[in-house]
Amino acid sequence: MGARISIIASGVLALLATGAHAADAIVPETPLAPAAPIATNFNWSGAYIGGQVGYGWASSKLLVDPAAAFKGNMGGFLGGVYAGYNFDTGTNVILGVDGDFTGTSVGETISHGDLASAKTRLRWSGAARARVGYAFDRFLPYIAGGAAFGNIGDKAHILGTRLISQSKTQTGWTVGGGVDYAVTDNIVTRFEYRYTDFGKRNLDLAVPGLKANEKMNSSDIRLGVAYKF
């Protein structure tokens, strides 16, 4: 009986010793390195408002039937404000609406010696547009188009007789494209090209029996800075 107890005790001690050696052999786990921060794309959603400056050039055609035709190319500076709202679809596609109002000095005086002269000026213009772009983080190339409106002033005379002296607001369409760049989370710069067609309009003449109409289209390049809310 004593011999059996001795054998059991020896076995228990052997098991304890084996467990101790196994515990000593366990290698502690190496702590995981901290995960690198995940880069996030800039969030374009939200409203914005800003100011812009630029240069525009336009071509006009004034027809006075049957007396004369005036054609001219004109240029000048422009400046104004714009505002809008962007909708981030979550797939890098950015949809938006954009509106602006701009004063211009785009105009020119056209003359045919002492016989006739005409002066046309785009006094101010504006637009309401839809935009679609594809974001590359803080860069947003886009195209835009919509309705345009502008106030065009005209003066003309033939042989000293005043034919036209008026200004009217004309509607048309506009299309263009550009790129927005988010300098900070709230400051967004813009570079844009735009083409606008103000359509054809009839003019009121001071001389009975004469009819006149005018067409005008313009192109311009604009630089803007906006605050994004």
Image (cartoon, helix red, strand yellow):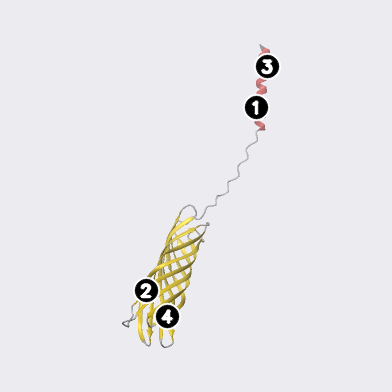
Q: Mark 2 vs mark 1: give the one in front.
A: 2
- Measuring from the top left, give residue 74's x and y in whole percent: 46, 77
Of circles 3 and 2, the one toward us is 2
Disc 3 to disc 1, how far (Cα)?
Answer: 19 Å
> What kind of element bears circle 2?
strand
Give the x, y percent position of residue 212: 36, 78
Amino acid type of the residue tagged 3 in the rendering? Ile
SS class of the residue under badge 4?
Answer: strand
Q: Residue at x 44, y 63 (%)?
A: 145
Instruction: Name the side, left or right, on which 11 lies relative to 139.
Output: right
Camera-near label (4 vs 3) is: 4
Which of the two marks, 1 or 4, is nearer to us in this view? 4
Indicate the amino acid at tag 2: Arg
Residue at coordinates 66% horizontally, 22% vertically from top-left? 13
Give the mark nearest the N terminus, 2 or 4.
4
Q: Do the residues labelled 1 and 4 touch (CB within 8 Å)?
A: no
Dot 1 crowding, Cα within 10 Å, few <14, some 14–19, many 20+: few
Q: Nearer the viewer, residue 134 or 206?
A: 206
Q: Mark 2 points at which residue?
A: 201
| Circle nearer the N terminus (1, 4) | 1
Which labelled disc corresponds to residue 7? 3
Tell me the crowding category of disc 3: few under 14, some 14 to 19, or many 20 or more residues within 10 angstroms, Cα based. Answer: few
Farthest residue, direction left: 208
Q: How far apart are marks 1 and 4 (CA)?
A: 106 Å
Residue on which disc 4 sits? 70
Pointer 4 or 3: first along the chain: 3
